[in-house]
Each structure stands twice: as structure tokens, then as C-alpha cells.
């Protein structure tokens, strides 16, 4: 059992847990994720490791309530525990030897982006962060990014915080003004990662994205998380979730997300009959 040591609400329907998991904390690196299960009947849910403390043996996970299983997790409290916690899974990303990077996060994507920005900063990079959300209320981890960023820009759809508009508007302004980066990391909604990758391709800026594809087993066996990268089939759970944004077939990913949304809507309709 993996005990919840702390719980706090970051935004409406977004919750952060600190969990005792010493073996995972020892091995965790930026880019890793976990699969958790609340009890024997519960669905297996993949979650990014949003932070870890090797000395204290703790990991941090952030989850948004979007359906039954995520609600079940969000309803857990300090003192409760997860039955299973499998990880770290996936391929970690390299954060050494960069001089200047730009980290671009959107919505819940700020959670997996944070350990990467933190590690890049710890390895001596100058970190420029651009965070986006629909509203100021939904913006998460601003304080944490402030601590690990040399410059922090914010964009909200309604202008309630920072610039009114999208993260790509700010990124484009910086690139247009001649700012040079060795690497861009973009994590957020698929459409945002696609827009960032299209923009950075024009500037030949190496770009890493992290795909939040549907995951079931997390071991490369079920095929649920498959993605086409440079014309080849890859699995986000074992080959990623980070990939070269200029090589990902985002349109295929967007079509698959749409398919699952329609399927979920039909299941919900059936639930109400
Ligand atoms: Fe099953 Fe990746 S989650 S192949």
C-alpha cells in the first residue's frame, strides 16, 4: 500500500497528492510516469510523476477529475492509500548540457513539464517558461515554475492572467525578437503541442513533446498508446512518452482522441438509460 501523506487542491477539479513510495522516488527521473490503482476493482490510471524527493522517499502526482476513475482518486484523502503503484515507467528525458531552453506548458501539462524544467535548471540551463491555461483560476504550478525559471510568461484564453491568448503567441514573439534556444519542451493538449511543433519547425528549434495517449497496460502489449513517429509505429508507454515534436503524426493522435471522446459519450449515454 502507498500512503497519501498530503493532498491539496491546485485548481477546480485538479488535485495534488504527495505519496510515500521510496523505491519509486529513488529511481524516478524527469519524464517517468506511473500506473496507479485505488483498489482491486479500480481501473489502472497512468499518471506522470510531477516531482520526487529521494531523501524523503516521496513522489508527487497531480490528477484532474475527468471521469469515474479520476474522481475516485481525487476523492482520496490524506491518510488513505493506493493499492498498487507501478513505476517508474517510460523513458526519462535527458536534461544535461543545455545552455538555454524554453518550456511550454498548457493546462494539466504543467504537471509533467515541471520536473523537466526543474532538472534542466539544476543542470545549469537558463530556463524560460511559458505557461497557459483557460483562466487564472485554472493555472497550476505558477509558484513552482517561478522558482525554477529565469523568466516566466503566462497566457490565459480570457486574459484573466498574463497575456490574453495562447502560449504559442508568446513563443512566437520571443522567436521573432531573436531569442535563441537549444531546446523547446512542450506539454499540454495535443492541439497545443501540434501548434508549438509547427511553429518551432520554422525556426529549426529542436522540440520535445510528451504524449498523453490513452494507456491501458503501460507495458507495450495492448497497443492502446500507439503513435506514429517519423512514419514508424511507437508506443508512448515504452518508447516515450517524450518524442521529437517535429516527427509526431499529431493529426492521427487528434483523430484517435476524437474517436475515444465519441465512444466515451456513447458509454455515458448508456449509463443514463
Ligand atoms: Fe498498452 Fe502502451 S499502454 S501499449
Image: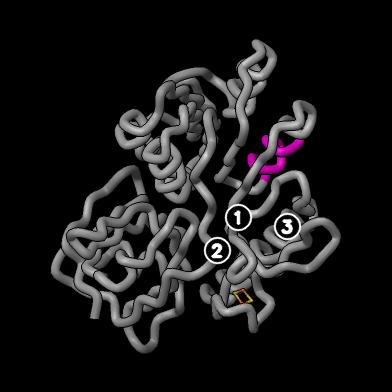
Q: Nearer the viewer, mark 3 or mark 1?
A: 1
Residue tagged by mark 1? 242
Q: Nearer the viewer, residue 217 or 96?
A: 96
Please tell me whether residue 11 is drawn above or below residue 29 in the rendered image.
above
User: What is the magenta range?
Assistant: 191-198
How many angstroms separate mark 3 from mark 1 (CA)? 14 Å
Q: Which mark is first along the chain, 1 or 3?
A: 1
How many angstroms separate mark 2 from mark 1 (CA)? 7 Å
Q: Nearer the viewer, mark 2 or mark 1?
A: 2
Look at 45% across and 54% down and name the residue there: 30
The quadrant of the rendering that contains the N terminus is bottom left
Q: Nearer the viewer, residue 234 or 27?
A: 27
Q: Which mark is first along the chain, 3 or 2?
A: 2
Q: Nearer the viewer, residue 48 or 255?
A: 48
Residue 77: tell me if it is visible.
no
Residue tagged by mark 2? 91
Q: Is residue 228 magenta?
A: no
Amino acid at each position: 500500500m502507498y500512503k497519501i501523506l498530503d493532498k491539496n487542491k491546485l485548481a477546480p477539479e485538479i488535485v495534488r497528492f504527495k505519496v510515500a513510495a521510496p523505491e519509486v522516488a529513488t529511481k524516478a527521473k524527469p519524464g517517468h510516469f506511473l500506473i496507479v490503482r485505488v483498489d482491486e476493482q479500480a481501473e489502472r490510471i497512468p499518471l506522470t510523476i510531477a516531482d520526487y524527493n529521494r531523501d524523503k522517499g516521496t513522489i508527487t502526482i497531480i490528477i484532474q477529475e475527468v471521469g469515474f476513475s479520476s474522481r475516485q482518486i481525487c476523492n482520496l484523502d490524506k491518510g488513505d492509500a493506493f493499492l498498487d503503484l507501478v513505476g517508474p515507467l517510460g523513458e526519462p528525458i535527458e536534461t544535461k548540457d543545455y545552455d538555454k531552453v524554453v518550456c511550454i506548458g498548457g493546462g494539466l501539462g504543467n504537471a509533467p513539464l515541471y520536473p523537466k524544467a526543474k532538472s534542466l535548471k539544476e543542470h545549469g540551463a537558463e530556463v524560460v517558461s511559458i505557461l497557459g491555461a483557460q483562466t487564472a483560476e485554472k493555472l497550476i504550478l505558477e509558484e513552482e515554475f517561478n522558482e525554477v525559471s529565469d523568466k516566466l510568461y503566462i497566457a490565459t484564453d480570457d486574459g484573466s492572467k498574463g497575456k490574453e491568448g495562447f502560449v504559442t503567441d508568446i513563443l512566437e514573439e520571443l522567436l521573432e525578437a531573436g531569442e535563441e534556444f537549444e531546446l523547446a519542451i512542450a506539454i499540454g493538449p495535443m492541439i497545443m503541442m501540434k501548434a508549438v511543433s509547427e511553429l518551432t519547425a520554422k525556426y529549426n528549434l529542436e522540440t520535445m513533446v510528451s504524449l498523453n495517449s490513452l494507456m491501458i497496460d503501460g507495458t507495450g502489449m495492448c497497443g492502446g498508446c500507439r503513435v506514429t513517429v517519423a512514419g514508424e509505429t511507437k508506443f508512448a508507454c515504452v518508447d516515450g512518452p517524450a518524442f521529437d515534436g517535429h516527427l509526431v503524426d499529431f493529426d492521427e493522435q487528434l483523430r484517435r482522441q476524437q474517436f475515444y471522446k465519441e465512444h466515451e459519450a456513447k458509454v455515458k449515454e448508456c449509463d443514463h438509460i
